[in-house]
Image (spheres, helix red, strand yellow):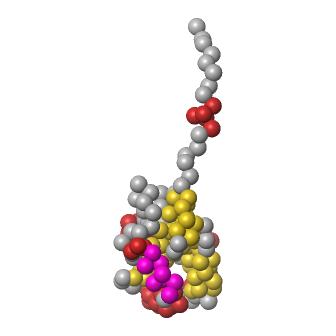
Amino acid sequence: MFSFLKKNNKNQNKKKEEVIIENSVFGKLKYVYTWWSFDRIDINMFGKTYSVIYSVASNAQKEAPNEVQERAFKKFLAEKEQLQRDAEKIILEEIKLDDSCEISDVINVVEVCISIDGKCGIALEIKEEYLDDIDLDELDITPDNSFGASLFPELKLIKSSDIFDEIFK
């Protein structure tokens, strides 16, 4: 025998709770496994301006950004022009493309990342339309078309999106 029960609409309409905070340094942030900015920041690299979001790492408890992260972001903003030039330099040294490709056409700047312990980096990717033309194995970019540049405390190229995420997410 079938019985028909009235459904509880409270549970059906309940969405995951959205967590949004306002921070004096980062502005308005939304938590989606880490803090994401509502604002964008301009990054000037390879002769182009990229308007990107920034992420501020957190933990499962959704802790708000800490003072170390705030100091790191302030440092990034204060030294942004030099940090962009430094990142360009290491990218050009380590990502060698053939003469038929301009790096400004091939690379996309995705976001600025601040780790829990105050490291700062820029996430980058090889644009999808160039993936058939570029050998990522030859460039040593694994496991996908994403990579990053650590800006401080150490300037270095991180050719693995997995390792970049471990550091900055």
Q: Is residue 73 magenta?
A: yes
| Residue 107 percent location from the top left of the image | 56, 78
Does residue 97 lie above or below 166 as drawn? below
- Of the pair 32 and 65, the residue shown nearer to us: 65
Return the residue found at the far front. 24
Q: Is residue 114 left or right of residue 81?
A: left
- Where residue 1 appears, as percent x and y from the top left, is 58, 7
Percent of width and height locating residue 115? 41, 70
Residue range corresponding to the magenta coloring: 70-78
Q: Nearer the viewer, residue 94 or 131?
A: 94
The residue sitting at 47% across, 61% down in the picture is: 34
Residue found 60% across the figure and 33% down from its top: 10
Going 56% across and 52% down the picture, which residue do you hit? 18
- From the viewer's perspective, is 47 left or right of 55? right
User: Which quadrant, please, contains the C terminus?
Assistant: bottom left
Prevalent SS, magenta region: helix
Left or right position of 51 against 90 = right
Residue 76 is one of the magenta-drawn residues: yes
Question: Taking 127 as reference, is 99 above or below it?
Answer: below
Nearest the eye: 69 or 151: 69
Residue 41 placement: quadrant: bottom right
Residue at (45% x, 63% y) in the render: 64
Residue 132 visible within the image: no
- Does residue 33 appear anywhere in the picture? yes
- Image location (x, y in percent) of residue 137: 44, 73
In the figure, 92 relative to 69: above or below? below
